[in-house]
Image (spheres, helix red, strand yellow):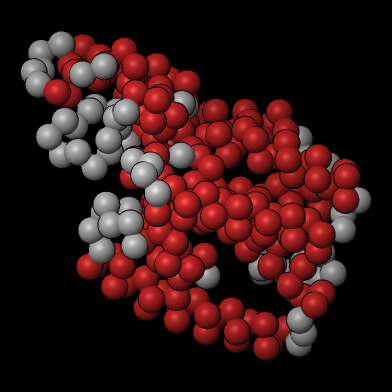
Amino acid sequence: MIGVDIFFVISGYLITALLLREGATTGRINLLEFWKRRARRLLPAIALVILLMGPITQIMQGDIRVALDRQVLGAATFSSNWLSILSGNDYFTQTSPQLFTNFWSLAVEEQFYVIWPLLLVAMALILQRRWRLFAIAVGVLVVFSLTISTVLAAGEAPLSRVYYGTDTHMYGLLSGVLLAFAVPWSLYPPTDKHVLYTVSRPYGMVTFARVLISWVCLFALIPYAVLAHESAKFFIPWGCLALLC
């Protein structure tokens, strides 16, 4: 469970750093080219998996073929997570595994690839490169996502709703976004374009604090990765606090 969220943080950081670097070096962000690059990386492999698994499932028996049309539709349109929520598919039910269940995380990732660059460009235009305000806005979205996760996990909502939802997993991706503003994009010296360095100097102190926090949070994550059951609700939101660091 926690591995997916760590991946989301890394992905949010890398994608945002890529976009920020492009904006800093060229003066603009080419969204069409960005989406083309993502498509070239992902679509061939996804199409191959779907085309190969279709015929193979015809000779297989059992629950793996349940709602196969819905599974294929979700995998092909990057909507697996929401279709699974709407159909009541439980990720944690071991007795009814489905062939394309794990495409849910790819769906969340692809939705981020489509929506986030648009928001980044829009917010940059609205806020006129006032990056502190930008970081605050993203931080509010992180808190919003954590709040939704906490409320749903504490209530009567199925755990799969918390696990599959784009809104409930947004905190990991957006935490990576915040890191992209705080960490030099390519190990460049600190400049006024990096939010963290405009409010916290000297550079050496910031680096030391970042490394120290990273190690503390790494050790905090180990008990969750080893001891927590994948369906344990106590991970939400307390395990997230270490994850976000």
Q: Can you give x and y, in whole percent of width and height, for residue 172 in the image?
A: 52, 54
Q: Can you give x and y, in whole percent of width and height, for residue 191 in the image?
A: 82, 71
Is 36 situated above or below 236?
Answer: above
Residue extending farthest to the front is 156
Q: Can you give x and y, in whole percent of width and height, for residue 102 in the image?
A: 32, 36
Residue extending farthest to the right is 128
Residue located at (63% from left, 63% from top): 179
Q: Classify residue 189 by image quadrant.
A: bottom right
Q: Can you give x and y, in whole percent of width and height, for residue 138 in the image?
A: 69, 54
Q: Classify residue 193 by image quadrant.
A: bottom right
Whether residue 144 is visible to the viewer of this picture, yes or no, is yes
In depth, the one of 79 and 19 nearer the eye is 79
In depth, the one of 181 and 42 nearer the eye is 181
Q: Is residue 37 left or right of residue 159?
A: right
Residue located at (66% from left, 41% from top): 116
Residue located at (24% from left, 27% from top): 99
Q: Classify residue 50 by image quadrant.
A: top left
Residue located at (24% from left, 67% from top): 226
In depth, the one of 103 and 56 nearer the eye is 103
**Numbered circles on residues, count:** 0
Q: Is residue 65 left or right of residue 197?
A: left
Whether residue 45 is visible to the viewer of this picture, yes or no, is no
